[in-house]
Amino acid sequence: MISPLAYVDPAAKLGQDVIIHPFAFIDKNVEIGDRCEIMPYASIMKGARLGKNTKVYQGAIVSADPQDFRWKGDETYCYVGDNVVIREHVIINRGIHPDAGTRIDNNCAIMANSHIGHDSHIAPYCVLGNGVTIAGDVKVEHGTILSSNVILHEDVHVGSYVLIKGGCRISSNVPPYIIIAHNPASYYGVNAIILGKHAGFTPEQIDDIAKAYRHIYQSSTSLFNAMRRIETDIEASDHRDEILRFIRECNSRIVANRIEE
């Protein structure tokens, strides 16, 4: 169903059973998958690629022009997966380079008044609370929850199954499986409830993750020595190795880290 009171550019490509409500705006060079619903006053701008069963609520703007002076008007893209919920007045900027683009993967929920900057990548099953602000070139991995009014600075990388509590300002990388709270941002423990009840981790796996982070955040040693202790004290596993890999790939720049000795 396409309301006669909506604007749909003739060049837009719509899948089957798409619902476009009155006063919605669908730009040129837009592709919308099957069974999507675009609510009144939502805008799907050029370069948007929406998957199936995605719902965009009132006043949201998907694939808005990038807010970056490096963008010179190139044709760029914003990719939104299947089963994504984009609530009221969310703004998602498309990329600044044609070969990259902003990506929101399958089964994400983006709550009201959030903003996702250019070329950021939100992995599947993430939840962004009301008023979350994400700068450009940010990566948020699988199953992470950002509570209301969290701010992620440019180039930040957040690992999988992280919980960042409301109002935190994050200017460095957040390794997987942990809870971050307060300002300045501080380590608040392992995200054990999500890991156990929703991600299928065993109690033994959660214990190993907690032991790894005790070395990193709750001992009196440097991060370099903490990494060595993790390799020595904790049996190799995918989860242990994911923590080590993440920290190494971030050049040991992680949130709430002590100054290296």
Image (spheres, rainbow, N blue to C red):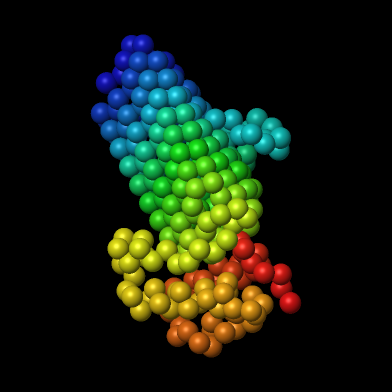
x, y percent for residue 126: 41, 50
Q: Residue at x 67, y 36 (%)?
A: 68
x, y percent for residue 90: 47, 33
Q: Does 228 appear above or below 165?
A: below
Relative to 256, 160 lies left or right: left
- Which quadrant of the view contains residue 193? bottom left
Q: Observer-nearest residue: 220 or 33?
A: 220
Quick one: quadrant of the C terminus?
bottom right
Q: Residue at x 48, y 66 (%)?
A: 189
x, y percent for residue 107: 35, 47
Relative to 254, 160 lies left or right: left
- Which quadrant of the view contains residue 12? top left
| Residue 40 in sight | yes
Q: Residue at x 57, y 46 (%)?
A: 151
Relative to 19, 216 lies left or right: right
Q: Does 237 appear above or below 139?
A: below
Q: Observer-nearest residue: 213 or 73?
A: 213
